Amino acid sequence: MTSTEEEVHTPERNGSNESVQVIVRCRPLSEKEIQAQCTTVVKMYPSRGVIEVENPKARSENEKNKIFTYDSVYDESSTQQNLYDETVRPLVTSVLEGYNGCVFAYGQTGTGKTYTMEGREGDEIGIIPRVFDQIWAHIARKTGVEFLVSVRYMEIYMEEIRDLLRPKSGKSHDLRENATSGGVTVTNLHSSTCQSTRDMLKAMKAGNHNRSTGATDMNEHSSRSHAIFQISVEMAEPNSESVRVGKLNLVDLAGSERQSKTGATGDRLKEATKINKALSSLGNVIYALAENSAHIPYRDSKLTRLLQDSLGGNSKTIMIANIGPANMNYEETIVTLRYAYRAKSIKNTPVKNEDVKEGKLLALQQEIERLKRMIMEKSNGQFDSTVRDGETEGSEMEDESDKEEKEKKLELGKMEVDELAKKLKTLEKQMVHGGKNIVDSVNENEMKLEQQRAEIAARKKREIEMQQKLELEEETCSELKQVFASLQQQVDFKREKLKRLNNKLQSIRQEIKDNHEVYVKDRQEIEEANDEAAF
Ligand SMILES: Nc1ncnc2c1ncn2[C@@H]1O[C@H](COP(=O)(O)OP(=O)(O)OP(=O)(O)O)[C@@H](O)[C@H]1O
């Protein structure tokens, strides 16, 4: 089924504020890095959500270690299953209640964004295929609810939007703002209706096949575009007057890269320039939101316009910052961690999309009812006329041409009914009845297992939060807990505290200096790349 534009209208915006959830994942050292005898500079403390990065070129104690805290962190031994259960599963549960959701992977090229979002075969499948499983497991259990599930897949390549499900459609894809919902939609994107995990996987694989990738010095299969996989789940009881709509954006961004490291020239360089430009717009949006600026520069790139609702809007959002552990990538790792740290303070206002009156599912339900009524009426009409025909059969008055006329009519009526029944079947196939009609049904044990995983994940999250709170309180309470035996002791304590604060101040000053240097270097690189690309 193709639709040109689809919009979700939010009846009112009175949701509560919710921070963007930020998690960091570090991949293992790559073969190349091992061969180059790189060392690991990243230390992770998953139970506290803390990352410590050691500066390999530190000139002083102040410059040595940088410490960052996030909602959760995943080290090289983390599994795809744990990451999904602990972070994405609860978000998809919300989407299935009618919220908008977004998961986006951000980071330097070759740090594992595609691995995290798509993954490999078997146990290593990534977030996107796991979302499919969760959605269909949910539908399989929801008796008495009708669903319409559809997907779209697009990429932003060189600032152009491409439809990954219909790459040769020849249609142009523009961005349109929706005044009611505040969201941004893309015109002429193909929407594929799905009835199972298999259908969704098929769409994902077909889209991946069409995605722009290429080899760079940093990654053999580098994504050269920002890819957005959109899932829409409409749900309603039969014959209802409104639907609930959950929408999920799964985003695999192209990696930020330094020309000096990727060895990009020609087309690769042009791509890199556009990629870096869009990512720098994303950074500016994150910065402006974190600073509570009056103006948020969403309009600077297609990427930021498309992510407008996910950052500072009506969505529950998870940012996954991917990093590598090697000393040679220290600077890029710090840049990613700083972006991610800023994103933590972005506040969204998610509102449930319920009582939506314009869903595709509603139109479908109404059309199905209309066809059923028409079939019934036509069948009854035929039946009546056959009975009447039977009554008059044999009558002397009946002439042969009348009989033929009636048979013709009957035949035509039957054809009409068949045609309508065929249409009905096609429409009914698009809709899925919860609790039945499903090929991939989930058994009782799997359900329990899933519930246990969700409980463990929630417990772990609570533990990290408590640990972080405890550390903060310990710091502030240590002074209060001190009992001073003498004035000298008090002076010593205050001197010690002053020293600590002074160290902190120095380290913040250093951080500001580093930030400025990185900014100047980034600008310089972008300008150089721009000049070269233009040349
Ligand atoms: N957590 C991980 N465990 C094992 N291997 C990983 C992990 N993360 C990434 N890799 C491997 O590292 C390589 C680069 O990963 P990937 O292609 O996902 O990076 P990327 O961030 O998407 O890069 P780009 O921005 O260039 O597209 C791949 O071979 C991938 O399989």
Image (cartoon, rainbow, N blue to C red):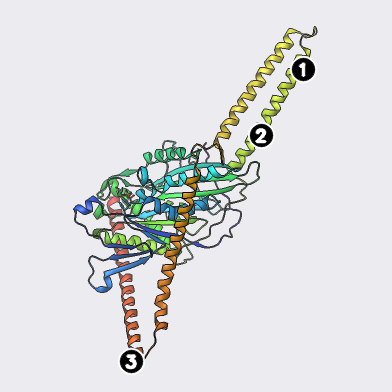
Q: Which mark is residue 388?
A: 1
Figure check: 112 above or below 388: below
For disc 1, the neighbor class at 10 Å (few under 14, some 14 to 19, many from 20) is: few
Residue annotated with mark 2: 370
For disc 2, the neighbor class at 10 Å (few under 14, some 14 to 19, many from 20) is: few
Figure check: 445 above or below 76: above
Figure check: 9 above or below 413: below
Q: CA distance from mark 3 to mark 2?
A: 90 Å
Q: Residue at x 44, y 39 (%)?
A: 203
Tell me if 413 is positioned left or right of 107 in this view: right
Nearest the viewer among 498 and 403 is 498
Q: Which mark lies nearer to you, 3 or 2? A: 3
Q: Residue at x 76, y 11 (%)?
A: 393
Closer to the chain start, of discs 3 and 2, is 2
Q: Are marks 3 and 2 in contact (CB under 8 Å)?
A: no
Q: Which mark lies nearer to you, 2 or 1? A: 1
| Amino acid of disc 3 | Gln
Q: Secondary structure at mark 1?
A: helix
| Amino acid of disc 2 | Arg
Closer to the chain start, of discs 2 and 1, is 2
Residue annotated with mark 3: 488
| Amino acid of disc 1 | Arg
Q: For residue 74, which quarter of the picture? A: bottom left
- The percent coordinates of residue 102 (x first, y second) are 46, 53
